[in-house]
Image (spheres, rainbow, N blue to C red):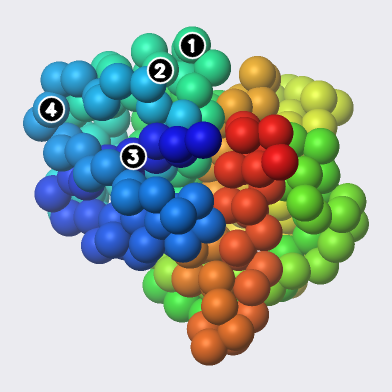
Amino acid sequence: MSFRAAVVTFPGSNCDRDLAVALEDVTGEECLRVWHGDADLPERLDFIALPGGFSYGDYLRSGAMAARSPIMRAVVQAAGRGVPVLGVCNGFQVLTETGLLPGALMRNAGIRFVCRNVALTVENSQSLFTSHYMKGQRITIPVAHHDGNYFADEATLDRLEGEGRVAFRYAEVVNGSARDIAGVLNDAGNVLGMMPHPERMMERAQGGTDGRTLFESAVRGLIGA
């Protein structure tokens, strides 16, 4: 069964190739590449990924300009139809700016860029993206961000917690995120935004395979394997 995944590239993206390679490695299929100025997505997509980087130079706010690029109208529509969308780092910022995910990503506490491997705990192991993890499992995934401090009002945070929409939580002090949230799901469960980079933890040569499990969860869940 053919698996059609696409990675969107914005001016300033620098992890788009990494995401494409990760998806190709897990699916065995060529990953489609989509430009921010395109008005339409390829037909019959099974998965869409928004990469890390500094889209549009992070002018205004991180992800704010990318969220208004032509392709994002098509991404929002696809997400509304149930197509899975993964946003990593800057991609997470874009997802909050489009309204596909609640909250906002602010400057890190201490106003410092954080670039290192961090420990996470898996908070929800029942989603499309996390089904091959165990709830409470401690994993290691790299981060590399300056604006990864997740913020939402208390009512929104309570709702995310109550609905099981916190996918990952930092198991150590990283950036000041509210309730140590590292990744959140939309209410339908087909959109995940996360600051850590799973595509950078795919092989033992990279230090481990904890990130690979996320892509395997999604792909196997979609093809029924």
Can residue 52 be seen?
no
Numbered tag placed on residue 6 in the rendering: 3
For the residue marked with disc 1, what is the amino acid? Answer: Arg
For the residue marked with disc 3, what is the amino acid? Answer: Ala
Q: Pointers 2 and 1 in contact (CB under 8 A)? A: yes
Q: How far from the left and from the top, in percent, is residue 124?
A: 81, 42
The residue at the point 77 percent across, 44 percent down is 131
In terms of secondary structure, where does tag 3 sit? strand
First-in-chain label (3 vs 2):
3
Q: Pointers 4 and 2 in contact (CB under 8 A)? A: no
Mark 2, residue position: 78
Mark 1, residue position: 81
Up-down relation of residue 88 to residue 174 (above or below): above
Q: Which of 140 and 195 is in front in this view?
A: 140
Crowding at mark 2 (Cα within 10 Å: few <14, some 14-19, many 20+) = some
Q: In which quarter of the image is the C terminus?
A: top right
Mark 4, residue position: 38
Numbered disc in front, either 3 or 2: 3
The residue at the point 39 percent across, 27 percent down is 45
Mark 2 and mark 1: Cα distance apart in space = 5 Å
Q: Pointers 3 and 1 in contact (CB under 8 A)? A: no
The residue at the point 15 percent across, 39 percent down is 35
The residue at the point 60 percent across, 64 percent down is 211
In terms of secondary structure, where does tag 2 sit? helix
Q: How far from the left and from the top, in percent, is residue 215?
A: 58, 52
Crowding at mark 4 (Cα within 10 Å: few <14, some 14-19, many 20+) = some
Q: Which of 51 and 64 is in front in this view?
A: 51
